[in-house]
């Protein structure tokens, strides 16, 4: 189901190409920090002292995105961005393997700035996105059930991302660009995160959380 939704959004984005000047695809390492999620996992570990391997925090993951930049003769250009992030936490204990899988899908609007006369090759972007999250848990490689249903938590919020990169020209109008970015989700409403991780509500977290993240990766684009 999640794959179908992402495929649908991707198809819609790629269809918007009549006025596009440039398309981009990137992949990156993503580091995430969420105080609320950290508190829940730390509470989970504290309440299970017999675990030989503690549950790692949800921190490290991968991100992939595609973008369209629309034609504009000025230094400021505009576009649309669709991104997907996956972050995983797994702990293996005797007869007990616990895995948390956190997904993010963002659909956003890009403000792209590039001035080849002053800073050749350098560019920066500001991206405002609507973001949706999904947190799932597996126990011994099977979906974990809580209250006679598969344990899951969905969230919704908004993200602001600042991105900077440097264009390296390849062949046939293709470019490769290393980049770094910083992002903030000040408010992500996800009331069931604690229930998925720790089977409790209101003990270690609120119904919402904030998320900070940074990414380092590569973009391939064609002009």
Image: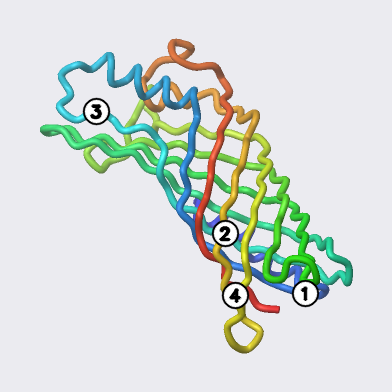
**Circles 1, 4 touching at the beta carbon (< 8 Å):** no
Circle number at residue 54: 3
SS label for mark 4 = strand
Sequence-first tag of 1 and 3: 1
Q: Circle 4 sits on which residue?
A: 168
Question: Furthest-left residue in view?
Answer: 94
Circle number at residue 21: 1
Decide: is 85 above or below 213. Answer: below
Sequence-first tag of 2 and 4: 4
State the count of labels: 4
Could you say where residue 123 lies in the image, as x and y percent from the top left?
Answer: 70, 62
Q: Circle 2 sits on which residue?
A: 179
Q: Nearer the viewer, residue 70 or 143?
A: 70
Q: Residue at x 66, y 40 (%)?
A: 159
Q: Nearer the viewer, mark 1 or mark 2?
A: 2
Q: Nearer the viewer, mark 1 or mark 4?
A: 4
Label 1 to label 2: alpha-carbon separation: 20 Å
Label 3 to label 4: alpha-carbon separation: 43 Å
């Amino acid at each position: 189901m999640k794959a179908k939704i992402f495929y649908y959004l991707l198809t819609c984005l790629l269809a918007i190409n009549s006025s596009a000047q440039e398309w981009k695809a990137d992949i990156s390492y993503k580091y995430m920090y969420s105080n609320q999620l950290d508190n829940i996992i730390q509470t989970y570990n504290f309440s299970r002292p017999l675990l030989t391997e503690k549950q790692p925090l949800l921190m490290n993951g991968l991100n992939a995105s595609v973008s369209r930049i629309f034609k504009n003769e000025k230094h400021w250009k505009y576009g649309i961005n669709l991104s997907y992030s996956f972050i995983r936490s797994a702990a293996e204990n005797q007869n007990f393997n616990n895995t948390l899988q956190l997904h993010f899908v963002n659909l956003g609007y890009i403000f792209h700035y590039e001035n080849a006369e002053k800073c050749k090759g350098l560019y920066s972007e500001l991206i405002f996105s609507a973001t949706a999250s999904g947190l799932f848990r597996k126990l011994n490689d099977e979906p974990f059930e809580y209250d006679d249903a598969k344990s899951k938590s969905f969230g919704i919020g908004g993200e602001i991302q600042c991105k900077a990169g440097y264009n390296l020209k390849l062949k046939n109008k293709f470019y490769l660009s290393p980049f770094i970015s910083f992002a903030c989700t000040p408010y992500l409403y996800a009331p069931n995160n604690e229930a998925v991780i720790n089977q409790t509500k209101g003990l270690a977290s609120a119904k919402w959380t904030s998320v900070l993240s940074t990414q380092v990766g590569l973009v391939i684009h064609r002009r």
